[in-house]
Every structure is written in C-alpha cells, then in structure tokens.
C-alpha cells in the first residue's frame, strides 16, 4: 500500500493547534435515538462548533501554519458555504485578509455570515463557471494562498480532530458514520478513528443524487458526476478528492447514500427529539443510522452532525 | 429569617439521585454571544435534557423517593407541558403509572410526547377549569400521589441541580439568569448558586405579560394575576409558589421581565448563532442577557436554556 498523504500524527498535531481555539463539541446521546436504532449512538455535535460547522477545524489548522509573509498576502477559498465561513473566521482570528469565492445561490445566511467575519465575498454562477479556476486566478493575481475545501493535508488533518475528540470522550466505537462531500471530514476521521479504535468500521454517507463516492469506490477510480440536485447544499461536490480518495479506499468500510426525503426525516428527528438545528448536509450520518442503511444494531456508533448553517425559511420548509 | 423549605443539601442529594439518569447537559459558549453582551456567557443547555427540558430533574427526584406502596398507586400531575413530560418519563423509568392533566391547547408535540412516554392524558379547558382541582380529585379517587409542577421541596431541589452542574463545570459566576414560571427552577438554582458561588446575583426572568413575580416581590406578598397572554406557554403561571416565593425573596437579586418580541429575537439568535431549538419559555434568560435587561457587561454569566419542546409550525412562525 502506498503511503497516504496524511497520517494520524498529523491529526494529533492538529488537535494540539486547535486546543482552546475550536470548541470541544459535546457528544450527545438520546434514549429515543438508541431505541429507534437499536444501537448506542454518540452524536458529535459539530453544528455547535464555531461558525456552526466542523469546517473551522481544517481551515484553522491550515491557516495557522502559514508563515508571516504568506499571512500578509492573504488567503483565497472557494466554497458553497461552510468552508467559506471556516476560512473567514480562522483568517479573522489570525489577522489574515481573506477573499471567498461563493456561488450566487449559496444560502443567504452563509453569505451574510462569511461577510460578517470580515471576508471579501466574490460571487460566481455555480452552473456555468468553474469556481476552482476563479479562485486560482484570484490567488495568482494577489500572491495569496489558495485554501481548498477538502483536498489538502492540513485541512484533512484538522477535520479528523472531530473523530479524535469523540473517541477520546466516549471510548472505542464499532461504527462511525461520517457526512461526506469532498471527503475531508471522512478521510480525516478515518485516520483518527482507525488508530484510536482499531477494528472500527468507518462509513461515509452521501446524498443519493450525488453518489460520486459510491461510483468511484466501485470502479476503483475517481468518477466525476454532474452537479448533483439535492437539498444537501454542502454535498454538491462532483468527485472525490485526489488526496481524500486513497485514504478512504485504504481505511473506510464503504460509502452509502441517503435520499433527500431521508435527510428531511433526519432533520425533523433532530429538531423534535434532539432540539438541534442541523442543515441537510449535516444529518447524512444520522439518516444512515435511522434508516438502517448501515446496520448498527447492538453496536456503539459514532455519528457526525457536521453543521447547522441554514436559513430560517429553508429550515421551516424542510421540517414542515 | 425563617428556615427555608429546601436547603442546598437537598439539591446536592438530588444531584446524587440524578447521576447517570439525567443528562449532564453541556455548558455552551459562543464568541458571538459574548461580543453581543460584553460578557462571558455560559449557557446551560437544558433543551438537551431528557424529554427536552429541565423538568425531568425535579420530577425524577420526586418520584424516586416514593415508597413501593405509593409507587403502585401511581402519580397524577397537572402541567401545560414540560412538567407533564418530565413526570411521564420519570414514571416510565421507575415503572409507576402516571396520569397527566393537560390543557386542551397545549402544544401538540407536548401532548404526543406525554402519551408517547406511556402516560394517561386527561384534558381540561385552561380558561374555564381549575387544573389543580381536577388533579386533586383524580389523585384522591385513585389514592395516587399528586406531583405539583413546582411547589414541592423535591421538585425544587431537583431543578436546582442544573445550576449545581453549571457552576461545577465552569466555575464561579457573577450573575445567573433563570427562566421563571412558578419558580421551581429559580428557587432551586438560587439555593445551589448562592452556596457554590458566594456573592452571585441570581435573577429570575419572566414574560412582561405575566409579571406575577415582579408584582409579588414589590409587594412582599404573593400576587395572583389573570392567565397571562404570552408566547411563553411554559410561563403562564398566575402566581409565585408558596414554597418558591420565600426562597426567591431570601436568595435572589430580583426578577426582570422580557417582552414576547424579545423572546422571539432570542429564539432567532439561538437558531441562527447557537444552532439550538429553544421554546419561547426557554429563552427568557438569554433574552435578558441580549437586551441588557440585566447588566451583564464584563461579568461571568450563567444562563439557563430551560427547554426545547415546540411544534415545528410554531417554531417556523416564531423564527420567521
């Protein structure tokens, strides 16, 4: 097996850097959820993370390692939302200028929050323009550092601290269900979980309409799909990452899909029974547990609740 | 000063009984909230408590002390909602039959949840009938134990464990803001907080339309008001409790009011920035901090988020 681009030690070092900066989010349990799933479930509530999603972990771990000259030239990121806010907040805390390339149809709350953290927002049309190219051009013009949303060793290592904390807090797990877009959270969590809880089965969970991971794992190569039409706006990636894919291939038990309706059911469950606001992309792991898409009966199960950034109107519509 | 009906030791013993049964809910912090208030705020997230509110603490502490004969005869409770669910869940866990007297206009989610815990629900019209009488008659007929919502030493002691845990977890506080209906949570938390954090200023917070506490404290006697018209359905009590009033008089710095619009603003803040579902009655303390009704600038402030049981439709309307 070729060496992976990121190791457990990178995750452990990221955890040191994030100590006292990121929230150590609670591991939430629910008797109702345990009854419904037949499992013992521990929810890593990253919706309660700073800026409302796990993305702060990776962004801060990346930015804090920039040298003074690079910090002065600033950072550029492209994101459908939470990565934008993560980079914006990390940049603000570190005094780094940040420009964020965001789609015109990103949720208003995410646009406002990104600007609220003091970042410059550069808008583009998600269906006709290539955000990576726009961001690369912008970064080249300014000499700024491009901070990709997932395909970066420091980003991956930072996201993995979510699983590291969860297992430190609740002990070994049999199964870990991780919300999966580009695979930054999944690959990072797989690095942490397989080290700290040997024998654990780590699964990614992605939307049915955007099953680039399922297709890619089946073919043993990265498949590119059209922009998926799903309520999970944080999971509209078109293909697994170059760095994240081999980590997932090497360490994960698989990736499963859930439908938009199952995401809505899980959002309603989180609202009614957990009293948590979770965005559609953030409940994918919970949906996999509730639907039995991954068989968790009788097991100790970790689930990432990856974010809670959603407009009031959209939330109201989806839980209605 | 006459001896109070409940002591700190009662709260400490309740904490022992609740260990491993109630959730030790997290103390949540938010940089945005600290910026907005100029304070260092620690939110005791009792919306994440079992059955979605602090009421489980008092109910369990009361029911677990019943002897076997009393357990067999069952319990009766009257409640606009969360106390009902607290008693129903505690009764279920202890194998005690429970009948709950609830208003016909209680939120559907609360009626359903109470029945879901296996309790018998007895409905009454809140504007024309006296729930206490109905419950007393029912209890007398069955030889069951009446479990009042707040005016009971074991209930008060149980609720106080919320403040006990918060101060154990985050250290001494300068101010504690407590959501106040009948005063069970306020009096219990005052007993815990003034013992564990000497010099702390404990404030109750009630809705403007239902200012029975403010009036009663001003007159030094318990005043009874009409059923208040407020969105805070858990705070529609008409007068302070016989046991809770002297405790609050002796230990609290005061009670302040917030308007329904301020409760809505606080609910929106909790949704947008904290990613938490809080019912109107549950954000009263947060509203007092956000509005500056209690001056918290430069202080270490504890705030109870007392519950999160609310219908999806009502929640959607209130955060719109």
Image (cartoon, coloured by chain):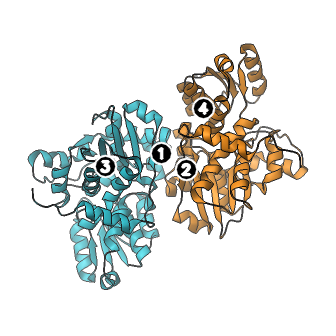
Chain colours: A cyan, B orange
Where B252 falls versus B59 (above or below)? below
Marks 2/1: CA–CA distance? 9 Å
Tag 3, which chain? A
Q: Can you identify the residue that label 3 sits on?
A: A179
Which residue is drawn at the image coordinates 34% and 55% (left, top)? Answer: A164
Which mark is in front, 3 or 2?
A: 3
B152 horizontally vs B270: left or right = right
Q: Quadrant of residue B37?
A: bottom right
Quarter of the rendering containing residue A23:
bottom left
Q: Label 2: few (<14), some or many (≥20) within 10 Å? A: some
Q: CA distance from mark 4 to mark 3?
A: 33 Å
Q: Position of residue B133 (x, y in %)?
A: 79, 23
Q: Is residue B203 left or right of residue A163?
A: right
Instruction: Evaluate whether residue B232 shows in this view.
Output: no
Label 2 or label 4, whichever lies nearer to me, is: 4
Q: Residue at x 44, y 44 (%)?
A: A317
Evaluate whether label 3 is on the same chain as label 1: yes
**Residue position marked by numbered label 4 in the rendering:** B85
């Amino acid at each position: 097996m070729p060496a992976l681009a990121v190791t457990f030690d990178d995750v452990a070092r990221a955890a040191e850097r994030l100590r006292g900066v990121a929230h150590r989010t609670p591991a939430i349990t629910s008797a109702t959820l345990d009854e419904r799933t037949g499992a013992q479930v521990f929810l890593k509530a990253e919706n309660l993370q700073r800026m409302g999603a796990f993305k702060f972990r990776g962004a801060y771990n990346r930015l804090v390692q920039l040298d003074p000259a690079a910090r002065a030239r600033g950072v550029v990121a492209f994101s459908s939302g939470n990565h934008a806010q993560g980079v914006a907040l990390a940049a603000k805390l570190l005094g780094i200028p940040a420009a964020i390339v965001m789609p015109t149809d990103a949720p208003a709350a995410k646009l406002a929050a990104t600007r609220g953290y003091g970042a410059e927002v550069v808008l583009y049309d998600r269906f006709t323009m290539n955000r990576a190219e726009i961001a690369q051009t912008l970064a080249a013009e300014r000499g700024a550092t491009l901070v990709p949303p997932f395909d970066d060793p420091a980003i991956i290592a930072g996201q993995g601290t979510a699983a590291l904390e969860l297992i430190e807090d609740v002990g070994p797990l049999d199964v870990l269900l991780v919300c999966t877009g580009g695979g930054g959270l999944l690959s990072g969590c797989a690095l942490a979980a397989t080290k700290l809880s040997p024998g654990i089965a780590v699964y990614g969970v992605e939307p049915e309409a955007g099953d680039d991971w399922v297709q890619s794992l089946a073919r043993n190569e990265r498949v590119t799909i059209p922009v998926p039409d799903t309520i999970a706006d944080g999971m509209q990636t078109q293909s697994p990452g170059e760095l994240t894919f081999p980590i997932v291939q090497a360490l994960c038990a698989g990736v499963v899909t859930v439908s938009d309706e199952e995401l809505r059911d899980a959002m309603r469950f989180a609202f009614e029974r957990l009293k948590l606001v979770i965005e559609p992309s953030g409940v994918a792991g919970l949906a996999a547990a509730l639907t039995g898409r991954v068989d968790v009966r009788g097991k100790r199960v970790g689930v990432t609740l990856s974010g809670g950034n959603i407009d009031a109107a959209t939330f109201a519509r989806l839980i209605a």
